[in-house]
Amino acid sequence: MTRPTPKTRADFAHFETLTTRWFDNDIYGHMNNTVHYQLFDTAVNGHLVAKGILDMAAGEHVFLVVQSGCDYFQELAFPGVVHAGLRIARMGNSAITYEIGLFMDGADTAAAQGHLVHVNVDRATKRPVPISPSAREILRPLRVDGAV
Amino acid sequence: MTRPTPKTRADFAHFETLTTRWFDNDIYGHMNNTVHYQLFDTAVNGHLVAKGILDMAAGEHVFLVVQSGCDYFQELAFPGVVHAGLRIARMGNSAITYEIGLFMDGADTAAAQGHLVHVNVDRATKRPVPISPSAREILRPLRVDGAV
Amino acid sequence: MTRPTPKTRADFAHFETLTTRWFDNDIYGHMNNTVHYQLFDTAVNGHLVAKGILDMAAGEHVFLVVQSGCDYFQELAFPGVVHAGLRIARMGNSAITYEIGLFMDGADTAAAQGHLVHVNVDRATKRPVPISPSAREILRPLRVDGAV
Amino acid sequence: MTRPTPKTRADFAHFETLTTRWFDNDIYGHMNNTVHYQLFDTAVNGHLVAKGILDMAAGEHVFLVVQSGCDYFQELAFPGVVHAGLRIARMGNSAITYEIGLFMDGADTAAAQGHLVHVNVDRATKRPVPISPSAREILRPLRVDGAV
């Protein structure tokens, strides 16, 4: 296990505010480790929908998760609000690596952080398709790799 | 199947604002019917925790759900914010019947409504115990049965 | 709250065997009340898919839940296998009321029981459509209302 | 993104058979990426409970997840049974790295594979504690690192 350093809010380009739920807490009284991934999905796809890049219901292309990971530093729990910070670490021809930090309300250091790799695919064939120039432009403010 | 009339916001005494999640949507592209119950739990227990009536982690008594139900009138879906209206229809010696309405942001008519029956139990023995006079007093504003 | 009597295995016409999951248990160490509905959905839709009545991905009609309810008598929990008993209480022109009992492995009395009301709808318009004669015939063994 | 090669059944030392659920499928009609982690948790903790190494409800120590990750190669979906293969890649003083492969019924190549890092902690203080010699002995058949 390689253990990264927790990121801070300044490391992220965009934030989504997410409410926790009673059943996020498992038998140990804290957010179950699988819920963090629900929040990752929500922050990333929520941003894509808001920006008009993803049309979940009718779009000809969608983004599928091909890899994910998370490091858990501190407990998150219901009740409480989570701020999900978002940034793009890498963007290839059809793949985007998002990095997400989860912050408890008021905290500056991430309680957990992880990544999702999305591949842009044709909805019917599920074969990779290139990310459009317009989507690249819209997502540019999230990029931390210096690339365009 | 008996089909009730959808309630409106004016029918509820208290509201909690809850964010939806990507995975709330099932294969039909709308909130899966089981998620509504997650929101019911969250609205009810969130209020009880906020009011100091429920200490999930360490309290000597907790509230267990012994009955629940929901009528679905309109689709809820991610993305979108849900307002959960709360009221108490009946309060017995140890049982409380909560009624919950779920409203899409901006809507005045409930997209779904249901109920939860909580029984106050001793945490260790799980036997019913009476609801304390102080809890009754705190919950009084939610009651619509005219009782005290 | 009207409290029904727990049903027994003999009350049900068909059974599905379902495994529990670590995260089914909530902070109280037992199956969270919302998971029962996941099991209801799974038992009912699993049977419909197996019988060729529901094509989730491509069918022109699907079944949407318009009402659900559950009574919780005893705790269910991970680890453990749950047997879900299934029967049809009522079948109208486009609506079917399923009753489901959840039994712990080895138990003859339901730990929880509830119902789902499905409405058969056109996938695109989401308007009710009649249940086909062939589906009625396939589902007949589940019916306890004496009707055909 | 580093993309590993899918493992086969022969790479794993122990298997758990898990049923899928209706709501495992998300809007894209396949198992949502967060459900894989529910299955990881279930396979690992289910084995620990069965072997008497974990007492979720009353044990003085429990295992908390501090890191997790998954690579998704092929779709999993309801309906269908998943076989979760389990092995231990590393065992330190208080941490265990489990590797899990998820196989569709009948398939020899993993549809998805990932890892969980568990840290053995004191239940009250949540501070790491050493894994006992008896637990090490019980888990030895899962180890692929050649160590004892």
Image (cartoon, coloured by chain):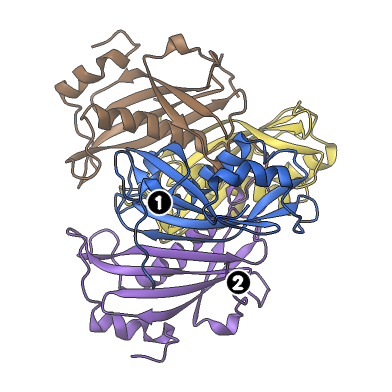
Chain colours: A brown, B blue, C purple, D yellow
Residue drawn at the location 51% of the way across and 43% of the way down: B43
Q: Chain of mark 1?
A: D
Q: Could one spot residue B33 in this view of the protein?
A: no
Q: Which is nearer the eye, A21 or A55?
A: A21
Q: Quadrant of the C terminus of chain D?
A: top right
Q: Quadrant of the N terminus of chain D?
A: top left
Write down the residue under mark 1: D76
Indicate the position of residue B138 as horizontal and vertical percent values. Answer: 63, 41
Q: Is residue D134 left or right of residue C27?
A: right
> In this rendering, is residue A48 above or below A35?
above
Decide: few, some or many residues near mark 1? Use Cα within 10 Å; few <14, some 14-19, many ≥20: many
Q: Are marks 1 and 2 in contact (CB under 8 Å)?
A: no
Q: CA distance from mark 1 to mark 2?
A: 39 Å
Q: Could one spot residue D116 in this view of the protein?
A: yes
Q: Which is nearer the eye, A15 or C23?
A: A15
Amino acid type at mark 1: Leu
Q: Chain of mark 2?
A: C
Residue C98 location, quadrant: bottom left
Residue drawn at the location 31% of the way across and 50% of the way down: B109
Residue drawn at the location 20% of the way across and 47% of the way down: A124
Write down the residue under mark 2: C3
Indicate the position of residue B37 as horizontal and vertical percent values. Answer: 48, 52
Under circle 1, the secondary element is loop
Mark 1 vs mark 2, foreground winner is 2
Residue drawn at the location 59% of the way across and 75% of the way down: C4
Indicate the position of residue A126 as horizontal and vertical percent values. Answer: 24, 43
Decide: few, some or many residues near mark 2? Use Cα within 10 Å; few <14, some 14-19, many ≥20: few
Amino acid type at mark 2: Arg
- In the orientation shown, which residue stands out farthest toward the right? D133
